[in-house]
Amino acid sequence: MFFTAMNRLVMAIALSVLSAFTWADQPLRIAAASDLRYALDDIVAAYRIAHPGAAINVIYGSSGKMTTQIINGAPYDVFFSADISFPEQLAREGLTVTKPTVYAIGRIVLWSNTLNALDLTLADLASDQIERVAIAQPAHAPYGMRAHEALQSADVWETVQPKLVFGENIAQTAQMTRSGAADVGIIALSLALFPEMAKHNHKLIDRSLHQPLTQGFVVTRNAADNPEAKAFADFMGTKQARNIMTRYGFVLPE
Amino acid sequence: MGALGPAEWQAIDVTVRLCLYTTLILMLLATPIAWWLAHSRSRFKVVVQSVVALPLVLPPTVLGFYLLIALGPRGLIGGSLEQLGLNHLAFSFEGILIASVIYSLPFAVQPLTEAFRNIGRRPVEVASSLGAGALDRFRTVIFPLSRGGYIVAATLTFAHTLGEFGVILMLGGSIPGETRVLSVLIYDHAEAMNYEAAHSLSLMILVFAFFTLFAVYSMNRRFGVSRV
């Protein structure tokens, strides 16, 4: 009896492995930087209304990590990065089918769950009242790189560095700050404008203090003959999508 | 506890399939390894024992890192598959299945080794002298005598695979319906500040894990006493 059961299960495994190689209709997979977590959810919802029946999955993470995943063969069709240098890197490696296109300029803000961010400056982060400051991991998250640059420009990097806690991506950084685990976070404006977060004030960080967050997207080689990928890329240029992006504080090209 | 949405059901489906297949594959794979470990007097035994136990002490990131490199399109295994016209295994269900089999190996091998050691060589030798073939000996002698060990090994393997996170995150990403298991979905919900969904899934896993362990320890007592 044991063996008949085993045989049946081995068959089931063989079949499911087989079906994995032959499936045709898979959803469009979008890899997106975490600053888009709420804006892109809204855009996908709007796209679904315009294209009923469209199957789309969005996976969020840091742009650097997504890039590494795509290089290692992750099956993403469209990649929305928080910094255009990552899609450009993929293009150089021959992993894309469209030219990297700028879709928005991001901004960084100061945000706090316990303090009024409007009263804060970057210089205040050096003060003793503030024990923990959250930023995204500068090694692979563009918002972390820009936070690093802003802290350097404001001449407080050396004093703030021992207080830093690093989020794996900018959404996690926002979550660390929202939980109160960090007194202040340097997060994306687009996340500070999410209703849950917008209950607290935010303070824009002067854009002259850091390199611009020029955000770019690209269609990957994985989607070479996927019309849905192109349709979604086109949809990003529509007034509807642009309005949503503006609502989340993004500055748009053109 | 909030109602479960389609994303949650999809993650449950992926998780249960992963746990089931991992358990089945490991029961087949661990049986010969455990038998050899239980009865061999080879000096390589300690080496094999150490290799089998490695996932217990290695950070999941080490395993995830090596597997990502090996199974990806530029890796030894993934690259060879691509050359054969097949898909590489990184960021796929098959990939995280391989990872789970390696990651849960000690949880299958150790209870079985223990069970086989308790049987001893004698019943098998007697069956052999009565003319039973290898498969026959396993089916009629070894398996019935070590049933408790199999139940414990299978339950622990299933539960440990359910608790997997780091390896899957590194090797699988978080692809819905493919590699987004429950633990990864909870991580995602927490990051999206969707605490309600994170709560209900976490509670579900907590309760399930408790009852699984409760069952394992109860069986351990029962079979531990009545074992031949």
Image: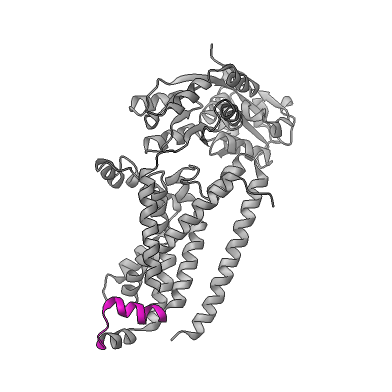
- Residue occupying the point 31% across, 66% down: B47
Q: Is residue A42 above or below residue A214?
A: below
Q: Is residue B159 left or right of residue A125?
A: left
Q: Which residues are magenta?
A: B129-145
Q: Which quadrant of the rendered structure holds the C terminus of chain B?
A: bottom left
Does residue B131 show up magenta in the picture? yes
Q: Nearer the viewer, residue A117 or B65?
A: B65
Q: Nearer the viewer, residue A1 or B128?
A: A1
Q: Quadrant of residue A238?
A: top right
- Would you say residue A61 is visible in this rendering? no
Colouring mode (rainbow / by chain / secondary structure / one colour): one colour
- Residue occupying the point 43% across, 38% down: A25
- Would you say residue B54 is visible in this rendering? yes
Q: Quadrant of residue B78?
A: top left
Q: How many marks?
A: 0
Q: Quadrant of residue A125?
A: top right
Q: Nearer the viewer, residue B21 or B172?
A: B21
Q: Position of residue B82 (x, y in %)?
A: 28, 41
Q: Is residue A24 left or right of residue A133?
A: left
Q: Position of residue B39 (x, y in %)?
A: 31, 78
Q: Nearer the viewer, residue B197 or B135?
A: B135
Q: Position of residue A108 (x, y in %)?
A: 60, 25
- Residue occupying the point 35% across, 55% down: A14
Q: Is residue B39 left or right of residue A240?
A: left
Does residue A224 show up magenta in the picture? no
- Residue occupying the point 47% across, 58% down: B19
Q: Position of residue A73 (x, y in %)?
A: 37, 38
Q: Is residue B210 above or below residue A101?
A: below
Quick one: which residue is furthest to the top in this view?
Answer: A254
Q: Is residue A190 above or below residue B80?
A: above
Main SS type for the magenta part?
A: helix
